[in-house]
Image (cartoon, helix red, strand yellow):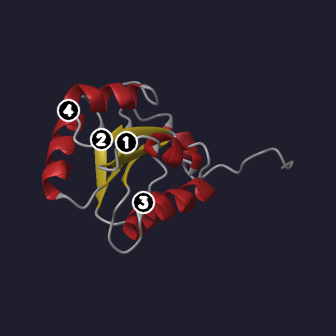
């Protein structure tokens, strides 16, 4: 393997055979989890949930079929920014979308500078969620 080549995660070939995109949703708010999981499943996604950054990284390591990560920023055990850094170290090409109540001017740029591929400010509705995901995956 040359220096430019990124090693593939085990199982990435199988990921392409799946007809449904798999979203890892990392969120510690039960109401938000219920809303997002309901919307995503109705839209044709499979969803895996984690309630803290450490479990998100552990789940990501064992589920190569994950297509996109929706990552809350303020999480227990390990924050979303650190979890995103660790996931990007494992798989630089996996899109990670910051899902956050931090919606001040400049926050989107800050999260993109931190390695996030997308930004979803809370509160968001069904259409905004799906429109954001469409930038990274098709059903």
Residue 101 on image: x %, y %: 29, 49
Residue 61 on image: x %, y %: 50, 61
Residue 13 left/right relative to 128: right
Which of the marked residues, 2 or 3, is nearer the chain's N terminus? 2
In front here: 18 or 76? 76
The residue to which callout 1 is attached is: 22
The residue to which callout 4 is attached is: 125
Which of the marked residues, 4 or 1, is nearer the chain's N terminus? 1
Q: Is residue 66 visible?
A: no
Q: Spatial distance from mark 3 to mark 1, Cα to Cα?
A: 19 Å
* Residue 26 picture quarter: bottom left
CB within 8 Å, label 2 to label 1: yes
**Residue most toward the front?**
105
CB within 8 Å, label 4 to label 2: no
Mark nearest the camera among 4 and 2 is: 4
Mark nearest the camera among 4 and 1 is: 4
Q: Secondary structure at mark 3?
A: helix
């Amino acid at each position: 393997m040359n220096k430019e080549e990124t090693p593939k995660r085990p199982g990435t070939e199988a990921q392409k055979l799946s007809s449904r995109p798999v979203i890892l949703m990392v969120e510690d708010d039960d109401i938000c989890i219920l809303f997002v999981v309901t919307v995503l499943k109705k839209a044709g996604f499979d969803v895996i949930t984690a309630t803290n950054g450490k479990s998100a990284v552990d789940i990501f390591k064992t589920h190569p079929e994950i297509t996109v990560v929706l990552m809350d920023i303020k999480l227990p055990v390990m924050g979303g920014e650190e979890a995103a850094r660790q996931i990007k170290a494992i798989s630089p090409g996996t899109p990670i979308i910051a899902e956050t109540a931090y919606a001040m001017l400049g926050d989107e740029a800050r999260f993109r500078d931190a390695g996030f591929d997308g930004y979803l400010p809370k509160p968001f509705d069904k259409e905004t969620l799906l429109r954001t995901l469409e930038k990274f995956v098709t059903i």
